[in-house]
Image (tube, rainbow, N blue to C red):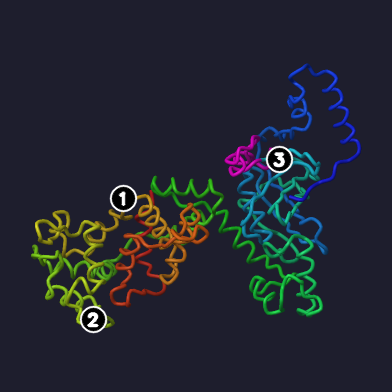
Amino acid sequence: MAAESFEAADIQKFIDHIRASAMSAQPGDMFDGAGLNDTWRRPEPQLLPVPATVRGFRIRIDLQRTKPPVWRRIEVPGDILLPQLHEVIQTAMGWTDSHLHRFRTSSDRNAPEFLTQFDLDEGDEGTLEDAVRLDQVIADEGDRLWYDYDFGDNWQHVLHVEKILATPPPAPVCVGGKLACPPEDCGGVWGYSELADWVRNDYEDALRPEVFDSAEEGRAWLPDGWHPAAFDIDKTNELIAAVTAEPIPVVEELESLLELARSRGARGLRNALAHPAASGGTDVTTDEAADLTEPFRVLLDVVGDGVTLTGAGYLKPAAVEQIAHRTGITEWWIGKANREDLTWPVWELRATARALGLVSVRKGRIAPTQAIAKHRDDPQAILRHITGRLPLGTTPAERHAGWMALAAVANETPAELWEESISELLFDLGWRDREDPYRAPSPDSPTLDALHLLAGAMRANWRPQGVNTAVAAIARAAIRA
């Protein structure tokens, strides 16, 4: 955050305190800083009592020092917690929550402020924002609250209470605003002003910010379609509804990962679980079950009551050829598809079926497990068994990747975007690429392999496309409490 100047009265107060401390000090305690700490310690914010009745607030948010001003008007219930208010501010303004933030209760140099979990993890002491309601900080028309974001670019916002609402809104809503949010990391108010002038004047080269070597570079850096005059209130409210929606109830292990993501200030997993599609149904029709389980049922049919593997532990060529033909692999596979070690889709199918507990390998033979032997002709029974085994894996890496795969698929993410979405969610949990700590990790996991197979990967050259609502239903069934 930008350095702030000391006023003469403050400096004189500091000098007087030093003189008094020096005159009263005893040998050995000249460097005791307790008195100075008391003098300059930041005061704690003073909270108002929780009101007996929840009211609403109409608040205008002004991004300070922007000319013309960038502002939004929101209506929120008084019992909204500060972390949720932070999300509403971010979304209403148009920020991406890529940096730290801080609420403070005045504009004074040493203003009382609320800490985030990040601050506490860094060793700071003070009042955590997590359990503080808005109506414990503001109460009347004219009250103000300050919100700082990105301590490098130093975006400072003032929240001004315009009206008290006797009936609080059922959910936060934006009711007005003007001008686009500055692009992230644009260099603060000064950088934003340069960019805005350049874009308003149709990218006139004489006004091009010096940070860009060319107009092409500058236009490529700007967010798609960004114009300083643009503000879409309908789109803004769609986004606010998405970020304020409550996540669906999920099983305990996934809930613990949701808490981990929250503690890291990441919203990706929460948004995935709060997506409207994540609340969809979990039922799968008989025809859908037959389609989803087809490759597994082919494998079960080929192995029958059990077949002997080769000396190296692979399926025999005749079995490999039959599986490849019946599952559609031969329609796109280059080669004879008669050796399991040279036909990786067949190997993947067997490995996944074994991980799911559909088949077992003992004493050189592969056979259906006892749990599935009586149901290998029942697609619904097989699908229930598969769902009950998800996610797969025993290590934290496999389990976390598995849960993120299920979360991404549950909200009907198109199959071509599964891997990207899973990597982003894993990054939010703290996982990184093994070779580059600044890159998101690989999305690969046994669970993702199973989902690919359910989505028809063996007939689609391992590249399923679009939304498979039946696979999404299976994912939802696996993650819900």
Q: Residue at x 17, y 60 (%)?
A: 359
Between residue 50 and residue 225, name the one nearer to us. 225
Q: Are marks 2 and 1 in contact (CB under 8 Å)?
A: no
Q: Residue at x 75, y 52 (%)?
A: 156
Residue 133, relative to residue 308: is it above or below?
Answer: above
Residue indicated by mark 2: 330
**Quadrant of res 339:** bottom left
- Is 214 included in the stretch rendered in magenta? no
Between residue 276 and residue 338, name the one nearer to us. 338
Q: Which label number is shown at residue 394?
A: 1
- The outermost residue toward the front is 27
Mark-to-mark CA distance, 1 and 3: 43 Å
Q: Residue at x 71, y 78 (%)?
A: 214
What is the secondary structure assignment of the residue under circle 2? Answer: helix
Tell me the kind of residue under disc 1: Thr
Tell me the kind of residue under disc 2: Thr
- Percent x, y of residue 217: 67, 76
Residue indicated by mark 3: 113
Mark-to-mark CA distance, 2 and 3: 65 Å
